[in-house]
Amino acid sequence: MKARIIVGAALVAVFLMMGVFGVRLAPYSPHETHYNQILRAPDRHHIMGTDPLGRDIMSRLICGTRTTMGLALIIAVFNAVIAVSLGALSGFLGGWIEIVIMRLADALLALPGFLLAVCFLGVFGGGAVRLALFLVLTGWAPLTRVVRNEISIVKNQDYITANASVGYSKTRNLFLHAVPAVLPSLLILFVISLIGDVFVIVSMSFLGLGLSPQIPEWGMVLHDSRDFILMSPWLFVFPSAFIGFFALGLHLMADGLREFFDAKKILYLVEKASRFSYGGTRAGEIEP
């Protein structure tokens, strides 16, 4: 478990450094073109070669890390906020609120997401804003269902019932005691959702429906290589390696966190931490 978390965290840390200091780490400008060095094979001057416009691939990948990873992170954060809000309300309150939210989530989950993204961006046009808007509007459903299921279990725990018996409001009980119990699972799903968001961003850019061609981004590097894969395979190999290692790092982190956040241990710790009310009453001392 520790080895997986360490390796995964190390890989993610490398990409974070490239995202933060990409411009300083890149050996060349990602926009600098050299028409006398078009499709140059990897050498000591261009470690990963050059693209059809003579731009350094390594520089474009390093600088594109901020774009791809930053956009995926923004989308994942918005999805997590929506999922916690809707999932917590539906799981804790139940009734017609739960029915409406869950049926809407089921409808989104039933749709073919990738095909829907192609249709949406094909009709309304590409771009970072439209792509992010689509992923936020459709990406909250899986997380919401998980949050709802776990809140439904947590709300029947003894400490939640005890808190309600001493006068805690539903809002206080929900957001101060029930929601923290699902954060470990949400953190794991948040890490995994980052991988899916990156794949969608890269895929849409590869199809020409994502970000602007002038913006350095992993998918655009792949997009530029589509006509030269057999003649210049490094155009495809290095961007794919970047995406693969980033996904591997997140997967290793998620697996390690899943083992660390054992469900019973987490619920036990959350229950003990929630025994003390903010008003001074030890609600957790009420045993069944």
Image: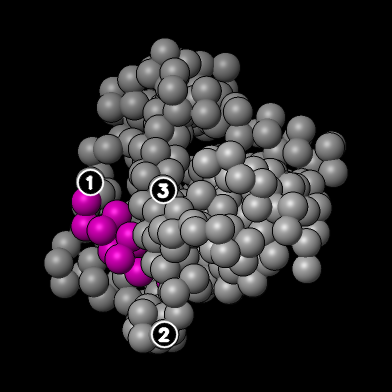
Residue that numbered label 2 is attached to: 95
Q: Which x, y percent locates residue 169? A: 44, 59
Task: Give the mark nearer the N terminus: 1 vs 2.
Answer: 2
Residue that numbered label 1 is attached to: 212
Q: What amino acid is found at the position of numbered circle 3 in the picture?
A: Val
Give the structural element (helix, strand or loop) at label 1. loop
In the image, farthest residue toward the left: 124
Q: Which x, y percent locates residue 27? A: 45, 15
Classify 10 Å Cα crowding around label 2: few (below 14), some (14-19), many (20 and above): few
* Residue at figure coordinates x 52%, y 23% from the top left: 17
- Residue 30 occupies quadrant: top left
Is residue 34 a member of the stretch shown in magenta?
A: no
Q: Are marks 3 and 2 in contact (CB under 8 Å)?
A: no
Whole-Å distance between the Cαs marked 1 and 2? 45 Å
Q: What amino acid is found at the position of numbered circle 1 in the picture?
A: Ser
Of circles 1 and 2, which is in front?
2
Residue that numbered label 3 is attached to: 77
Task: Give the mark nearer the N terminus: 3 vs 1.
Answer: 3
Image position of 286 with respect to 148: above or below: above
* Residue at figure coordinates x 74%, y 47% from the top left: 272
Give the left or right position of residue 285, taking residue 146 as reference. right
Give the left or right position of residue 270, taking residue 149 as reference. right
Of circles 3 and 2, which is in front?
2
Give the structural element (helix, strand or loop) at label 3. helix
Q: Which quadrant is the N terminus positioned in?
A: top right
Q: Are marks 1 and 2 in contact (CB under 8 Å)?
A: no
Whole-Å distance between the Cαs marked 3 and 2? 28 Å
Q: Which x, y percent locates residue 246? A: 59, 42
What is the span of residues highlighted in magenta in the rendered image?
129-141
Q: Which quadrant is the C terminus positioned in?
A: bottom right
* Residue at figure coordinates x 23%, y 46% from the top left: 212
Give the left or right position of residue 287, taking residue 94 as reference. right
